[in-house]
Amino acid sequence: MPEWPDLHVVRGRLEKALVGHEIALVRVGDPTVLRATRPVETFLAHQRLTGIRHRGKFLIFDLDRGRIVVNPMLAGVFEIADAESKLTRSTALSLVFDDGTDLRYRDDKRMGKVHVVDLDDDLHEVHGFGELGPDAGDFSWSEREFADRARATRRELRNLLQDQTFLAGIGNAYADEILWEAKLHPKRRVATLTDEEMSRFYRSLKEVLARGTREVEEGLPPELGTKIRDHMQVRLRKGKPCPRCGTPIVKTRHGLDDMYLCPRCQPPPKGQIR
Ligand SMILES: [Zn+2]
């Protein structure tokens, strides 16, 4: 799923390519993911894109008379294509701008949501948007404030990282990376962290997202359309040696999700099964 670093970079790229341009043609491929109260083809046509914003796992496209709010969920990706090239079956929406640039949103799992709303509609009514915490890659809490807020939740670390009302934008991949960096087991409870561990948790979160953003910026091709994961240390690396200690990385379940960790660097909490 696209996470904070992915969408941060995608926003910048799309802003450069598209802001100021007018939508010349709207094509709806697969309407499953669209959430709109009116026909989007006629509503969006001839609107000018005035800005693009990023919040957590959402991108917001500001137009003359409306907005498009996209939550890509598990598999949604943005692509910049040539308008002449064929639309794939999973292309939900294609916006061809006045210079011929085609912005496409593709969603192989059809789990994402593309909300098309009026300018005066309240974005807080978009599912999940109103409750978002500060952006995970760009929040201003001090280490102390972070620790206080984290401890107040009494949650397990991985659940806390993925709680969009705490910090917005972290999903499975960066949660695994942050916890590996911090040498903390995902099921540790916040309340059990020593001051030193809490400090490591905070610094790892900041560092891993900043590094991820740099790596995505470097690796993402001009046409977008993919997720950059090569820089990850444990995610999708089952059986490969831990870059720190050489122990094979373990893949396990965490609720409905897959989780990757180093069993040596990230020992399970006492009295709990791994
Ligand atoms: Zn290790």
Image (spheres, rainbow, N blue to C red):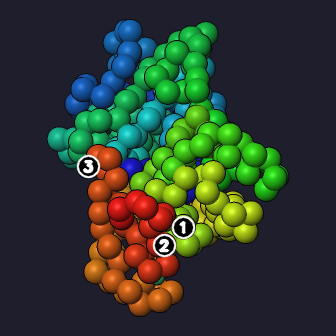
Whether tag 2 and tag 1 are in contact, CB under 8 A, the answer is: yes
How far across and how far down the image is residue 106, in percent? 31, 43
Q: Secondary structure at mark 1?
A: loop
User: Which residue position is annotated with label 3?
Assistant: 85
How far across and how far down the image is residue 201, in percent? 64, 63
Is the residue marked 2 within 8 Å of ligand 1, measured from its CB? yes
Is the residue marked 3 within 8 Å of ligand 1, measured from its CB? no
In the visual, does 149 lie left or right of 42? right
Q: Nearer the viewer, residue 223 or 128?
A: 128
* Among the two numbered marks 3 and 1 on one chain, the one whose residue lies closer to the N terminus: 3
Q: Is residue 197 visible?
A: yes
How far across and how far down the image is residue 24, in percent? 43, 29
User: Which residue position is annotated with label 1?
Assistant: 184
Q: Nearer the viewer, residue 143 or 65?
A: 143
How far across and how far down the image is residue 147, in percent? 73, 51
Residue ranking furthest to the front: 271
- The dot on residue 266 is 2
Q: Is residue 147 above or below residue 205?
A: above
Q: Is residue 200 above or below residue 81?
A: below
Q: Is residue 195 above or below residue 152?
A: below
